Image (cartoon, rainbow, N blue to C red):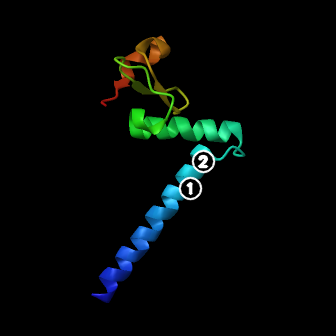
Amino acid sequence: MKTIGSILLWTAVLALALVAADQTMVRLPGAPGDLRQAYLELRHDLLGDAALPGKPAPQGSPRYIYVDADGELHFVDSLQEIPPSFRSEAQRLKH
């Protein structure tokens, strides 16, 4: 019983630390602009529309994901943003 309590305590501590780090990146004005913007875009790609307060994603248009020739992963808001050579491999994201 002591072990379960310890696991729950440390799980709660880790969750609070993750929330604190997330909110620091979202709200801290001193964070480097490029790093903050990259984090906000990643957060939006992972969590969807609720991830960027004050900057909702375009409504009604599907999002897509594709991998370029260098193996880099890209998230885009429309099929037209994907280079023609990669469109056949692109996948539509579900919301």
Q: Residue at 44% x, 63% y: name it.
A: 15
Rendered location of residue 44, percent (x, y): 46, 36
Identity of the amino acid at label 2? Met
Q: Quadrant of the N terminus?
A: bottom left
Q: Residue at 47% x, 63% y: name it.
A: 16
The residue most toward the left is 1
Marker disc for residue 25? 2
* Left or right of residue 33, residue 93 in this image: left
* Left or right of residue 1, residue 33 in this image: right
Q: Nearer the viewer, residue 73 or 16?
A: 16
- C-beta proximity under 8 Å, tags 2 and 1: yes
Identity of the amino acid at label 1? Ala
- Report the Cα–Cα distance between label 2 and label 1: 6 Å
Element at label 2? helix
Rendered location of residue 24, percent (x, y): 60, 51
The residue most toward the front is 54
Provide the residue designation for mark 1: 21
Element at label 1? helix
Q: Nearer the viewer, residue 78 or 56?
A: 56
